Image: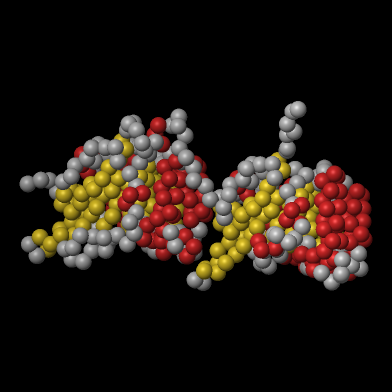
Amino acid sequence: MTSAFINRLVTGVPGLDTILGGGLPEFSFNLITGAPGSGKTTLAHQIMFNLATPDRPALFFTVLGEPPIKMLRYQQQFSFFDVEKINKSVHFLNLSTEMNSGDFDQVLARVVKEVNDRSAGLVFVDSFRSVSSISHRKSEGESQLQQFIQSLGSFLTGWQATTFLVGEYEGTDSGANPIFTVADGIFMLNQAVEQNSTVRKIRVWKMRGQAVVNGLHSFRISNSGIEVFPRLLSQPRPEDPARQTVGPIRGRLSMGSPELDAMMGGGLPMGHSMLVSGPSGSGKSTLAAMFLAAGARAGEKGLLATFERNSSQASHAEINRLVADRSISVIETPGLDVSLDETLHELTLAIAADGATRVVIDSLSGLELALDPHFRLDFREAVYRIVAGLTAAGASVIITTEADQHCTHPPTAPHTTSFLTDSMIMQRHVEVDGRLERQLAVVKMRNSAHSGAVRAYRITDAGIEITPRS
């Protein structure tokens, strides 16, 4: 017996096909659930307009919710809305008359007739929760509802239509509602308010016949519609030694300072990550800028992701020039309530688009403030995912972080994150003869010999200059 191949439909919703494992199974019977305002109807429309063609027309049935004219008024504000498809490959129909009769047979007959008459390949029913509400008014409503759902699913599957039922269901409804059993796929959307921040998540709770990326994935609703940011943790390809942080070092990258390179055994190993920690004014951003500039001089592309209120490249003339020359690209995220998944997605896209091999994140302190509260709860996991994701994408990464220091006491970071990176440089202020002196040391370098010396340095217009030993 040979296995049957199930064709997958590419929904065209950014990020959704990734978590689906490549697309939506054709002829599947799906449920889109979530609270009011979570984006259910928008997701349904976006999938419909992306997939509907003259050879695969779509029918969108409205029940007792919004009338089609009102729904169209709002949905046409999205860029995916194609007015040329209306009444050609996309048809809107209202079932309120049949639903008000309370007769499920009439509803099913109308759906069957429209699907047959228009040779539909896509069928949407919004809101199917209204159908369930009507069943509760009748003494035999539950059994009739179950029979109706089974009949509807059997007909549409036999007709070879891909179906979506949209409704305000919660996870607690899954045990008693027959629709959860019949459905091949279940999409659960939710939004929560955490410390004045709105966080939107989507989960593919069920999808028969294929593996999906489990868990909750962040998404945004913009003028383009819904964009999903998959919660992925990529692994380096074994055939690419530059992306491995375990094993022999295949090459090193200059930090832009010969003295610092010597302290690090020749520079930062390719594919490694490094944390630069120090108090305010110690030159963390300057050191990171030197790393990017050294790469640009060697013909390597760089990427600067800044989460500070004032972009760090503004105080570094060479970085400004390299940005203008497009040797270095900049991603600025000065706002709050940033999704970690969205941030990592944007960074990996920029790496792929520009071919960047050197990445600077300035700084962890700013990133923590920018992240929405959900991701702040486990900040170390957020840092781990960023480091793993960027190094897996082929980048060598430097991350700066603020460390508190009181006068001559050693600096301390608010989070223990140093174990998440391959290397670490610590900067500090030290009182010497009544003045503050800057000092740095290479605290650790995984799989690499390095100097244990503490060296004084100055910050000049050219960057960091390590003071020669006396």
Let me know if residue 80 appears in the view: no
> Is residue 423 rendered to the left or right of residue 239?
left
Say how many tags the image has. Answer: 0
Let me know if residue 149 appears in the view: yes
Position in image of residue 41 (x %, y %): 71, 60
> Is residue 440 rendered to the left or right of residue 400?
left
Query: In the image, what residue occupies the spot 89% across and 61% down?
Result: 104
- Image quadrant assignment for residue 75: bottom right
Give the image's coloring scheme: secondary structure
Query: In the image, what residue occupies the spot 43% across and 54% down?
Result: 381
Q: Looking at the picture, tell me which residue is in the foreground, 107 or 93.
A: 107
> Is residue 252 rendered to the left or right of residue 213?
left
Position in image of residue 419 (x %, y %): 33, 49
Position in image of residue 295 (x %, y %): 34, 41
Query: In the image, what residue occupies the spot 52% across and 47% down?
Result: 232
Please say if 220 is above or below 197.
Answer: above
Position in image of residue 8 (x %, y %): 70, 40
Looking at the figure, which quarter contains the N terminus?
A: top right
Query: In the image, what residue occupies the spot 77% across and 64% down?
Result: 129
Return the residue found at the far top: 1
